[in-house]
Amino acid sequence: MTRLWGNYFRVIIVLTSFMCLVSVCSNYIIINFTFICMKDDFSQTRILNGTEKSFYDYTPTEKKYILWAVALGTVVGIFPMNVLYVRLGARIAFFSAGVLSAFTTGLTPWAASQSMWFLMALRFLQGVAYSADFAAIGIVISKWAPLDETAVFIATLTSFTSISSIITNGVSGVICESDLGWKWSFYFHSAACLFVFITWALIYKDDPTLHKSVSAKELGKIQKNKSEAHINDDMKIPYVKIFTSPVVLTVWLCAFTELSTLILIATYAPIYFRSVLGFDVSIIKIIGFYLGIMLAIHLPFRFVCAFLSDKTKCISEMKKIHIFNTLAVGFVGISFIVFSFSQIPAEHNISAVVCLAILECFTSFNCGGFYKCGTLHARQFSSIVISAIQFTKCISLFSGPALVAFFVTDEKNQVEWSYVFITLAGFTFLANVLSFIFFTDQPAKWTEDGGVVKYSKEKEAVKI
């Protein structure tokens, strides 16, 4: 009997996994937008420097600690979460992280009404849940992605940060201005998180060979040209060789610069738009709309890039990697420098949205750049390389607020913000130069053990 999804059940797996990634990310960035409307909630007040203010009107220092609590939780959670993945598999480990994220999100309004310590404790636990994201990406790609669809899988799963920003900024903007108030943004996200993770746990299996919904033809496509060690996942992981590889280290540096860019925009765009560019808080839904457009505009480019990376044959793989990586990393640095030196008058503040949208477009080339390089070089251990990108994301969670805290004393001062952009641009140039030295499309020597399983039209995979 022909299944409803035919020979494409892997599409269901990747889309459901993607929605779970979006949900966990959305849960930790809600507060970045609700900061704007929380300060207008005078249901509780406090005296600060002799002035009565909303209990939820946080100082820049308090905002920094609230954001850093997530980063600290992510750092602390990386090791135990990866242990859970190894011992229990992605199905249980990722589901547990989703439940933790949902409950901490739902309790955030209560914690915020109690004290900074309660709020920071919940933010820390949200960071622990968030640390599970990239390990999940690595395992889903390693287990479910055919080699000739690697870039498309990468493009889909790694775009969760932008999509979560689009959803969260838009939904939070509407809810904040409604009669429900900012607290219901957290309740809504919590309920949505539970729903998508329960769905994921019901349909996901760690091994496609054991899934009844995967046809023999689809299993053959998933396993084509993969080594026995890759398929069986029974080979000892050469951690030392992976973590000392110049190629892998350069991949992580490129990932750090790209993630730092995206996190800086996702975290501080609402504040920058309001304080520097003069968007009126009374039209808060418009701010959310502009942010959504800014982050969404690059998504079509991302999937076009993934398709070109997988299917273009007239250019060598190595040249494609260098071209795509330069556009994703090097050009972003140039864009940041141009943006930092552009003095945009308040009446032309929409120009800033366009500039940042262009910058976002070029980050979409990363699926054919450093991500593709890391996957081709590490082969069956690509899940380890992609999972370790989570650590670079942890550094990014610290580095973004740290740069802002160091350079920006007045949130309305555009010159101080430009120092942040220029510093980040310097890292992108360094990473791009190193990529020309170390990047390769060849598998590492430590991946050469194990035979290769190949399938033809006459031979199909047989399920275990």
Image (spheres, rainbow, N blue to C red):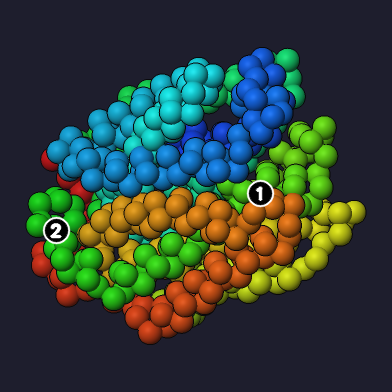
Is residue 343 visible to the viewer in this orientation of the structure? yes
Say whether residue 323 is left or right of residue 118: right
Q: Are marks 1 and 2 in contact (CB under 8 Å)?
A: no
Tell me which residue sits at (69%, 19%) in the image.
42
Q: Which residue is more in the foreground, 164 or 218?
A: 164
Residue corresponding to mark 2: 237
Tell me the CA gap for discs 1 and 2: 40 Å
Q: Which residue is more in the foreground, 449 or 223?
A: 449
Secondary structure beneath label 2: loop
Task: Indicate the quadrant containing the N terminus: top left, top right, bottom left or bottom right.
Answer: top left
Say whether residue 34 is left or right of residue 203: right
Say whether residue 319 is left or right of residue 241: right
Identify the mark nearer the N-term, 1 or 2: 2
User: Which residue type carries mark 1?
Assistant: Ala
Q: Position of residue 273 (x, y in %)?
A: 74, 48
Q: Position of residue 212 (x, y in %)?
A: 25, 31
Tell me which residue sits at (54%, 38%) in the image.
62
Residue corresponding to mark 1: 269
Q: Which residue is more in the foreground, 354 or 176?
A: 176
Q: Position of residue 135 (x, y in %)?
A: 31, 47
Q: Position of residue 367 (x, y in %)?
A: 46, 62
Which quadrant of the figure has residue 452?
bottom left
Q: Is residue 273 above or below residue 41?
A: below
Tell me which residue sits at (77%, 68%) in the image.
342
Tell me which residue sits at (49%, 71%) in the image.
427
Is residue 298 visible to the viewer in this orientation of the structure? no
